[in-house]
Amino acid sequence: MVENAQTTHTPLGELTLPLGLGTKSVSYGARDALLYALSIGARPTELDLVYEREAQHALPTFAATLGLSFTQTAAETIGYDTDAVLHIGQRLELRSALPLSGEFELYGEVTKILDKGRAAIISISVSCEAFTAEYAMYVPGIGGFGGERGSRDAMPRPGDEAPSVSLPVSDSAAAVYRLVAQDFHPVHIDTRVAQSAGHNAPILHGLCSLGMSVVAACRAAQWRHDAIRTLSATWSSPVSLGTPIELSWQAEPAELVFESSQSGSVVCQGVISL
């Protein structure tokens, strides 16, 4: 938690962008990549995803977990409490298939701050030789600084007749994912924090629901995960634990559009390109 942010940090309207967040070295092994695949719904029979003798690459969405710590760095640098922050958008650009194990030097920067009145949207870019990951974070309580308001681009949606599949979400999905992906935001495990943020109970990580959607959509469309080069997604609603997600998708030769819903509400929309 950041204390006394208003007196110890530069006001949002006076920040010069892009705002550098420094560099970090990250490394991971095959075990990390395989556990991640299992945590987002890869099946034990999908040996190219979960078995070290057959898997050659990590899933593309794993890249987003590698740069996530820069969202905390941005909060500490700018000066806001992360407990109520919502991850509302994600973009990935992979320059090649992500290796099953690797070590990268990541550079992070805040690229945009939008003023939404009562809140701000902070855009954070993390890049290395293998990928660029961009995170859009909705931060309540720090808007009204006179900045650019901006707009949110609409995501393409599958057609009304698009096929769909139900994806189970276990009661323990968030508790497992937070350890696998090292995504330790308390809203996913601590009922008190979740309720203070307006939820009845802990909610699933957005990056987990995104990973689940991508794995299932690629499986259904018979797309190769290691061929994916770009991914854009937005979240509209939180995902409750213990209730299935309904995924619909529409595949074109070089583009795969998907949408996930829970209890009639859209939670995640995205488009994947080769």
Image (cartoon, rainbow, N blue to C red):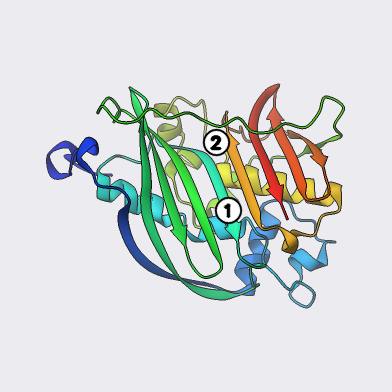
Q: Amino acid at mark 1?
A: Leu
Residue 191 is situated, as x and y percent measured from the top left of the image, at 46, 34
Taking the image as shown, residue 231 lies to the left or right of residue 71, namely: right
Q: Does dot 1 land on a helix, a strand or a loop?
A: strand
Residue 202 is situated, as x and y percent measured from the top left of the image, at 52, 35
Q: At 85% from the left edge and 48% from the top edge, which residue is drawn?
A: 221
Q: At 33% from the left edge and 23% from the top edge, which residue is drawn?
A: 118
Q: Does dot 2 land on a helix, a strand or a loop?
A: loop
Up-down: is 7 above or below 107? above
Check disc 2: other Cα within 10 Å, few if <14, some if 14-19, many if 20+.
many
Q: Amino acid at mark 2?
A: Ile
The quarter of the picture where the C terminus appears is bottom right
Up-down: is 74 above or below 100? above
Pointer 2: what residue? 203
Residue 227 is situated, as x and y percent measured from the top left of the image, at 74, 62
Taking the image as shown, residue 181 lies to the left or right of residue 266, namely: left
Pointer 1: what residue? 92
Mark 1 vs mark 2, foreground winner is: 1
Number of the label disc, if any, that sits on residue 145 = none
Where is residue 49, by image quadrant? Answer: bottom right
